[in-house]
């Protein structure tokens, strides 16, 4: 199905470009210096499939070799309203490029590696047990492929809404506020940040588990408990956050992250393959009663969705160079085609090797030399530190823009001190929650049901309907409404399943548990 909605040829907008400040990018500039004034006359607001190409870019870009060069940008629009849906003009939120972080500076492949780092984080070691075991071969394999296709589709929709009403929307809440108004701005912000907070906390738990798994390989004496490992993980994450001022500054660290990902993925793959070839036939039956199978299937479906999506695509897209939408689509295809291959390999081989007994942390199931498993666990620990920074960057951006000075070098005494105090405080809260509730996966399932589903699927399709309503055919409208209603129902079902899991596990676990 054509996700662009068709429509006639776009009409070129007249654009007046205002000379930017010499300190346009924020690594050493005040927050307000990222604001670009663009005045356009519109005949409509259609967002074509090519929007964001070189003819549609709406951003000034100063390259490293041509720091004073300006790029004139044009916006293609179709027929209808101004891209704001039916929102009351008095309640719309104007988009703002004011930010203390660097934007519009990264090539598409760097953004692709940002997305792939999130997909192939150490969470990938749990999908054999958390998704394949409850679903089985047929539904599990089909589910992973179908979830990838649906997620790619929804993310492309969001990417093509990045330029609406003649402005870029560098935050998810800005886009929702521009289309729906102030109430939806606040609701989207709340959903997104609760979701990202839980993901960040989950990463700290995951890093703590990797650290403890390494310790247990040598000394299983119970001295180094999981809460202690979580505290160490939180401290290391904070040290990393102090030295990386913004998402674009990851650069070389994305290379290290990819290398670390390959270490634990290849290790888990090879050791699982070795075990699978040397062990008798495995049991692939789905465990549990009929009632528990229903709930575990719904929870596994939520896991499939979680594995591909970030819930912060506009914030990631804000870092990409023009042409923004075309480059973002390249990054998304890289994520879902190239980046998805390691995920499939380790997930399917892990389930093939151990069947229904597969652990939710695959490295606990494999057999092999202790030093090899140690290297894999340590790689998972450090890769998690990098991955957390990606999902924490929207919170860092808000804190730095709202409360930071944003002037001078990002490594000036003031800016480093600010990061130590503010980011250190934020990660301290994350670490405390992680140590207090190391079984947070149950709560993350609930959060994903109430936020990841609405942000990634429900809201994306409905926003597209609002912006493109005058250009969509009846079948296309029906398709988007089917997505809105279907994923709303799945979100509610996943929330019920997550609540049941919390109730069941509350009888087993306790605060500061050593899992």
Image: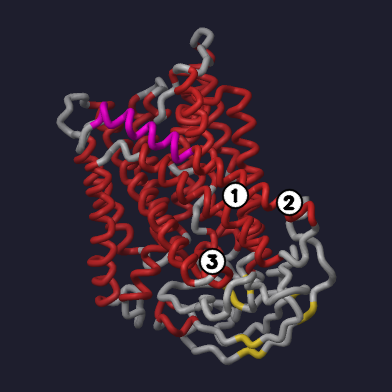
> What's the CA distance linking mark 2 and mark 3?
22 Å
If you read the primary sequence from the N terminus, does the residue marked by circle 3 or circle 1 appear first?
Answer: 3
Q: Which residues are magenta?
A: 494-509
Q: What residue would you read off at disc 1?
A: 335
Q: Nearer the viewer, mark 2 or mark 1?
A: 2
Q: Is residue 33 above or below residue 373?
A: below
Q: Is residue 122 above or below residue 387?
A: above
Mark 3 crowd level (few <14, some 14–19, many ≥20, 10 Å Cα): many
49 left or right, relative to 276:
right
Please, what is the dominant secondary structure of the magenta stretch? helix
If you read the primary sequence from the N terminus, does the residue marked by circle 2 or circle 3 appear first?
Answer: 3
| Nearer to me, 328 or 464 | 464
| Nearer to me, 239 or 89 | 89
> What's the CA distance linking mark 2 and mark 1?
28 Å
Percent position of residue 40, x then y = 68, 85
Q: Residue furthest right?
A: 8
Q: Is residue 397 above or below residue 36?
A: above
Q: What residue would you read off at disc 2?
A: 478
416 left or right, relative to 456:
left
Asked whether residue 410 is in view, the answer is: yes
Percent position of residue 387, x then y = 42, 51
Dividing the picture into quarters, in which one does residue 104 lie? bottom right
CB contact under 8 Å: marks 3 and 1: no
| Nearer to me, 513 or 43 | 43
CB contact under 8 Å: marks 2 and 3: no
Q: What residue would you read off at disc 3?
A: 176
**Residue at disc 2, secondary structure:** helix
């Amino acid at each position: 199905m054509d996700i662009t909605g068709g429509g006639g040829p776009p009409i070129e907008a007249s654009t007046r470009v205002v000379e930017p400040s010499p300190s346009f990018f924020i690594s050493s500039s005040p927050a307000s210096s990222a604001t670009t004034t663009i005045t356009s006359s519109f005949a409509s607001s259609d967002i074509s499939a090519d929007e964001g190409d070189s003819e549609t870019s709406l951003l000034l870009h100063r390259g490293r070799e041509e720091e004073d060069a300006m790029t004139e940008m044009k916006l293609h629009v179709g027929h209808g309203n101004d891209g704001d849906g039916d929102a009351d003009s008095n309640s719309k939120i104007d988009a703002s490029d004011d930010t203390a972080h660097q934007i519009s500076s990264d090539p598409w492949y760097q953004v692709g590696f940002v997305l792939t780092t999130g997909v192939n984080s150490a969470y990938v070691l749990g999908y054999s047990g958390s998704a394949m075991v409850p679903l089985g071969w047929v539904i599990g394999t089909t589910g992973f492929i179908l979830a990838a296709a649906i997620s790619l589709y929804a993310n492309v929709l969001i990417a093509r809404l990045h330029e609406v009403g003649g402005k870029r929307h560098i935050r998810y809440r800005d886009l929702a506020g521009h289309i729906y108004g102030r109430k939806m701005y606040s609701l989207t912000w709340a959903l997104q940040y609760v979701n990202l907070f839980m993901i960040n906390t989950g990463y700290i738990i995951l890093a703590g588990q990797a650290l403890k798994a390494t310790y247990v390989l040598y000394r299983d004496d119970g001295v180094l408990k999981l809460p202690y490992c979580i505290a160490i993980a939180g401290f290391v994450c904070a040290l990393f956050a102090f030295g990386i001022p913004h998402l674009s500054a990851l650069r070389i660290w994305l290379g290290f992250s990819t290398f670390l990902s390959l270490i634990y993925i290849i290790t888990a793959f090879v050791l699982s393959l070795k075990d699978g070839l040397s062990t008798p036939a495995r049991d692939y039956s789905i465990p549990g009663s009929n009632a528990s199978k229903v709930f575990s299937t719904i929870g596994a479906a939520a896991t499939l969705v979680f594995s591909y999506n970030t819930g912060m695509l506009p914030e990631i897209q804000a870092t990409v160079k023009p042409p923004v939408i075309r480059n973002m689509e390249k990054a998304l295809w890289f994520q879902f085609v190239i980046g998805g291959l390691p995920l499939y390999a380790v997930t399917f081989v892990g389930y093939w090797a151990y069947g229904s007994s597969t652990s939710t942390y695959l490295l606990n199931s494999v057999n092999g030399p202790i030093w090899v498993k140690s290297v894999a666990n340590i790689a998972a620990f450090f890769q998690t530190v990098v991955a957390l920074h990606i999902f924490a960057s929207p919170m860092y951006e808000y804190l730095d823009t709202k409360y930071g000075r944003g002037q001078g070098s990002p490594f000036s005494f003031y800016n480093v001190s600010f990061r130590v105090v503010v980011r250190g405080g934020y990660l301290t809260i994350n670490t405390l929650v992680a140590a207090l509730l190391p079984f947070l996966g149950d709560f993350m399932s609930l959060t994903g049901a109430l936020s990841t589903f609405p942000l990634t699927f429900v809201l994306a399709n409905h926003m597209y309907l609002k912006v493109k309503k005058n250009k969509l055919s009846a079948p296309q409208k029906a398709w988007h409404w089917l997505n809105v209603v279907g994923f709303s129902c799945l979100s509610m079902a996943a929330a019920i399943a997550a609540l049941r899991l919390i109730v069941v596990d509350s009888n087993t676990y306790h605060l500061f548990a050593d899992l």
